[in-house]
Amino acid sequence: MPCTVIVGAFWGDEGKGKIISYLALKDKLDFCVRTGSVNAAHTVWDGEKRYALHMVPAAFLYPRCRLLIGAGANIQVPQLLKEVEMTNVKDRMGVDQQASVIEEKHSVQDKNSAHLRGIGTTGWGVGPALEERVRRTAKLARDIPELKPFLADTVTEVNDGIDAGKKVLLEGTQGFMLSLYFGTYPYVTGRDTGAAAIASEAGVGPTRVDDVVIVYKSFMTRVGAGPLPGEMTKEEAQNKGWFETAAGTGRDRRSAPFDFDLARKTAKINGATQAALTKLDSIFPKCRGARKLEALPTGARQFLKEIEDRTAVPVVLIGTGPDARDIIDLRK
Ligand code: IMP
Ligand code: MG
């Protein structure tokens, strides 16, 4: 996997953080570039310790991975500094000088806008910050004194890394159905969240990407307003053990069963070459902690086969528990 994009299939919260942290440790990633902004939290478990990362790349668990924030990303400075401290990654964290910055006023604008309240944004201010960037009045990372120690030309670093055969992961955030272009507009986020956009935000050309790993969760969830096909009540979700709250905002997540047609569509538009499926243990509790395909019950295997048949993408990583290592890895 010299250069791989990780993209979420649905409305975010598919478990990208877990998949990325596993790949970081297993493949010994050289670079991980985070895209998007502070609205997305990636949950990473290291044994009993849980991290909800809004800014630091989820590959931090592997201590030799260089951690970057791409030029297309948007930085919430206090949150980044807090997470750098918490994860102790000061010496290997790099921020692109051209990444833009979210300020406190953007969060105030986000929270005070009736329109954005109706969409149910996270309130971090990402939409208003991106508006400013488009207007070309936004501050960039290079304008912020606190970011000086981290400033880097991440685009050159990553492209030189790819030339040198290093292992590079481009970390997508949120999910494809929240894409400004392809999602459930206007109930979407302020950017394209697809695989092509992830590569673009990181400054990597499409021909340099070797694999696109689409991440599915075994059921679908969404926070905020907007359509969710097959949505069930909170009680039904609780009974099935699918009820979740958001890692970032603590809000209730709405839930629905896995949608094979939607899975097929999102795999195609993102050009997925491989799929990861997370939380198989929440629909088949006997899968919990399994690390071999043979350990899965028949129903779980049928579910996997149906996903592969309907999406035409091989499911190569199967999450069976929260820890980064609770995974069945079927890659060659
Ligand atoms: P915004 O991105 O904060 O503007 O919010 C727009 C919509 O995207 C709202 O429905 C949010 O709940 C949703 N959203 C944004 N980021 C995430 C995420 O990381 N996970 C899940 N939903 C998200
Ligand atoms: Mg999340």
Image (cartoon, rainbow, N blue to C red):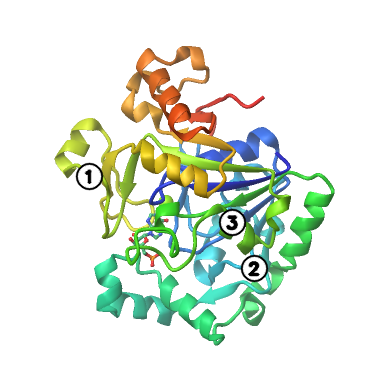
Task: Tell me the kind of residue under disc 3.
Answer: Ala
Mark 3 and mark 1 in contact? Answer it, CB < 8 Å.
Answer: no
Task: Tell me the kind of residue under disc 1.
Answer: Glu
Q: Is residue 160 left or right of residue 44?
A: right
Residue drawn at x 34%, y 51% as measured from the top left = 246
Q: In the rendering, at what x and y percent does residue 269 appear? A: 51, 49
Query: Quadrant of the rendered structure where residue 84 is?
Result: bottom right
Vertical order, 178 against 307 (above or below): below
Query: Quadrant of the rendered structure where residue 225 is?
Result: bottom left
Q: Mark 3 sits on what residue? A: 196
Residue 267 or residue 326, whichever sits in front: 267
Vertical order, 114 against 325 (above or below): below
Total numbered badges shown on the rendered structure: 3
Query: Quadrant of the rendered structure where residue 148 is?
Result: bottom right
The residues tagged by marks 3 and 1 sit, at their Cα atoms, a distance apart of 29 Å
Vertical order, 208 against 306 (above or below): below
Residue drawn at x 37%, y 63% as measured from the top left = 188
The residues tagged by marks 2 and 1 sit, at their Cα atoms, a distance apart of 36 Å
Q: Mark 2 sits on what residue? A: 71
Task: Give the class, few, some or many, for how many residues have Cα within 10 Å of label 1's Cα (few <14, many ≥20).
Answer: some
- Among numbered discs 2 and 1, the one appearing first in the sequence: 2
- The nearer-to-camera label among 3 and 2 is 3
Residue 129 or residue 135, whichever sits in front: 135
- The nearer-to-camera label among 2 and 1 is 1
Q: Is residue 293 left or right of residue 144?
A: left
Q: Mark 1 sits on what residue? A: 231
Is residue 247 among the parts visible in the rendering? yes
Q: In the rendering, at what x and y percent does residue 6 appear? A: 56, 46
- Among numbered discs 3 and 2, the one appearing first in the sequence: 2
For the view shown, which residue lies furthest in the right direction? Answer: 164
Quadrant position of the N terminus in the picture = top right
- Among numbered discs 3 and 1, the one appearing first in the sequence: 3
